Amino acid sequence: MTKEENYLKHKKETVIRIIDHYNKNHTKKDKCNLVQDRNNFDLDQTFCSSEHCIHCGECCQSFPCVFSPNDFLDIKNIDYMLNILNTGLVCVGFNKAHFIIRPRGLKDKDAFGIQTGAYTTNGNRCLLLGKNGCLLNANYRPSEELLYYLDANQYDHHVLYDEDSYIEDYWEYRDIIYELMGKYKTVFNQSDVTKLLDERIKIIDSFYKDDETIITERAKQLIKAING
Ligand code: SF4
């Protein structure tokens, strides 16, 4: 099995666990039936597909979404997690005073992200939002946003992995993230992150006329790091 196949298997298991948890807490009428065959489904076609993302991206323009701790192969492996953070595209953030891990936004200039959540990070556009939607394909997209899906009228979003759910999932890893933050602070590359943010702002200011080479290349590094 290749690293990509191994990661995809892991990601699908994570998604199924999240949906099972969601369904346990919802009545029959509101249950999610998107995954008919648990052993064979396509993440992009099943959930918030890139096709819709291109035409929307509204949330991503306001605040970055959040990874599940289980989106990573092993959140307890500090070196693995440092490789992911070192791409500069991901940071440790805080939501309601809890640690979470999420993509970096334009306002996250330091080692650690600012408080996350719609009210405190409005305008903290995600660095990974490209001219054609998210630069991470569905297999690597953080579970919070991946598991937004449109209903039949293609208008309303349903949120399968909400704030309370991911905060609950991160709780058991709080000591690990605290340790990770300490180590990351010593290797955090401020000038590298500033370069990424500057490039992103330049592209946004020029209404996407510039190409996205640097950020796209960095997104590939992030995917490689997530694969382990
Ligand atoms: S990672 Fe992708 S889906 Fe999540 S906020 Fe950024 S652009 Fe949007």
Image (tube, helix red, strand yellow):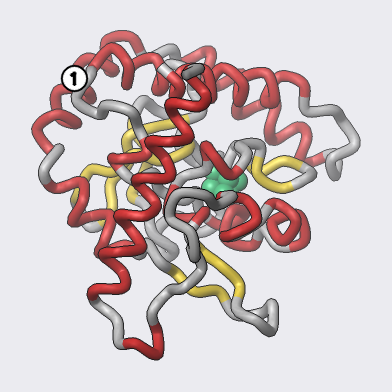
Quadrant in the picture for residue 118 = bottom left
In this view of the protein, can residue 125 be seen by the observer? no
Position of 22 compared to 4: left or right?
left
- Place of residue 181 in the rendered image (x, y in percent of width and height, measured from the top left): 23, 25
Q: Closest to the observer: 35 or 88?
A: 35
Q: Residue at x 14, y 23 (%)?
A: 179
Number of dots carrying numbers: 1
Q: Which residue appears farthest toward the bottom when viewing the image?
A: 29
Q: Residue at x 28, y 17 (%)?
A: 184
Q: Residue at x 55, y 21 (%)?
A: 194
Q: Which residue is mark 1?
A: 182
User: Compared with residue 146, is residue 148 higher up or lower down, i.e. above or below?
Assistant: below
Name the image quarter holding residue 61. Answer: bottom right
Within 10 angstroms of label 1, few (less than 14), some, or many (20 or more) residues? few
Q: Label 1 CB, ligand 1: below 8 Å?
A: no
Q: Amino acid at mark 1?
A: Gly
Q: Is residue 178 left or right of residue 186?
A: left
In x, y percent, where is residue 162? 35, 64
Q: Residue at x 22, y 14 (%)?
A: 183
Q: Is residue 25 left or right of residue 126?
A: left
At numbered mark 1, what does the secondary structure look like: helix, strand or loop?
helix
Q: Quadrant of the C terminus?
A: top left
Q: Is residue 121 above or below residue 4?
A: below
Against 88, residue 112 (above or below) is: below
> Is residue 160 something one can see in this rendering?
yes
* Residue 81 picture location, percent across and down: 32, 21
Q: Position of residue 160 (x, y in %)?
A: 40, 66
Q: Is residue 186 above or below residue 75?
A: above
